Image (tube, rainbow, N blue to C red):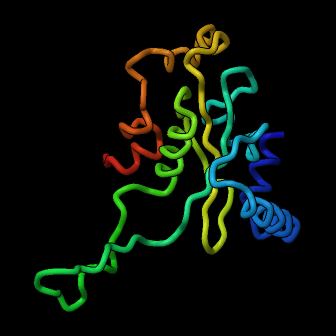
């Protein structure tokens, strides 16, 4: 089953998939920027990244604005010819920004991982997998109980998720 889900996401040019994503994005634009969802949209990708359908694990869809960053225009001192406002690249990728916003919205949860689910001309959407370190079902799970340790507290803000590791370099 997961193979078929993966194939449908890879063939995004398929007219049926295109129409479905268009409807979803129209609906998502009307929703808040960070919203908790019942089930992950890309189940195969979520399972690869550690998602399990159990208590203590939630999925949040986060909307992040696209485009490059702009520095404010200089107001005093010598004015450069181009003013240094364009070609200003953010040090963080949008996926990490989405993870950080989800962690801020749900302070009692830790970010496990995230993945892309859609984009339009103005926004990108990511689904972030969050884990509750205090949940008994997580403490019992031998594959996930490492996140209950104090050393993993605030891991998204220290660049320890996969999106954070990408920007830290090799």
Report the residue that reaches farthest toward the right: 16
Is the N terminus in the top left, top right, bottom left or bottom right quadrant? top right
Q: Which of 30/51 is in front?
A: 30
Q: What residue is rendered at 82% in x and 48% in y? A: 4
Question: Does 139 sit left or right of 71 as displayed?
Answer: right
Q: What residue is rendered at 62% in x and 36% in y? A: 129
Q: Is residue 65 above or below residue 35?
A: below
Residue 133 x, y percent position in the rendering: 55, 19
Residue 39 x, y percent position in the rendering: 78, 38
Question: Does 151 sit left or right of 117 as displayed?
Answer: left
Q: Is residue 78 above or below residue 140?
A: below
Report the residue that reaches farthest toward the front: 76
Residue 126 x, y percent position in the rendering: 62, 51
Question: Does 33 sit left or right of 168 as displayed?
Answer: right
Report the residue that reaches farthest toward the left: 78
Question: Does 12 sit left or right of 64 as displayed?
Answer: right
Q: What residue is rendered at 66% in x and 70% in y? A: 120
Q: Which of 111/115 is in front?
A: 111
Location of residue 141 (image quadrant): top right
Location of residue 131 (image quadrant): top right
Residue 145 x, y percent position in the rendering: 55, 14
Q: Which of 35/140 is in front?
A: 35
Q: What residue is rendered at 73% in x and 46% in y? A: 42
């Amino acid at each position: 089953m997961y193979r078929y889900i993966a194939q449908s996401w890879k063939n995004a040019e398929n007219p049926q998939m295109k129409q479905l994503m268009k409807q979803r994005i129209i609906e998502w634009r009307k929703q808040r920027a960070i919203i908790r969802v019942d089930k992950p949209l890309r189940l195969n990708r979520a399972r690869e990244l550690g998602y399990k359908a159990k208590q203590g694990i939630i999925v949040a869809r986060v909307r992040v604005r696209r485009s490059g960053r702009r520095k404010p225009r200089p107001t005093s001192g010598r004015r450069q010819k181009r003013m240094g406002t364009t070609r200003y690249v953010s040090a963080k990728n949008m996926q990490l920004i989405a993870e950080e916003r989800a962690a801020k919205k749900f302070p009692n949860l830790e970010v496990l991982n995230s993945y892309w689910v859609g984009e339009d001309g103005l926004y990108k959407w990511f689904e972030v997998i969050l884990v509750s370190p205090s949940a008994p079902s997580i403490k019992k799970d031998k594959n996930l109980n490492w996140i209950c340790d104090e050393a993993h507290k605030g891991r998204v803000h220290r660049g320890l998720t996969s999106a954070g590791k990408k920007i830290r370099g090799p």
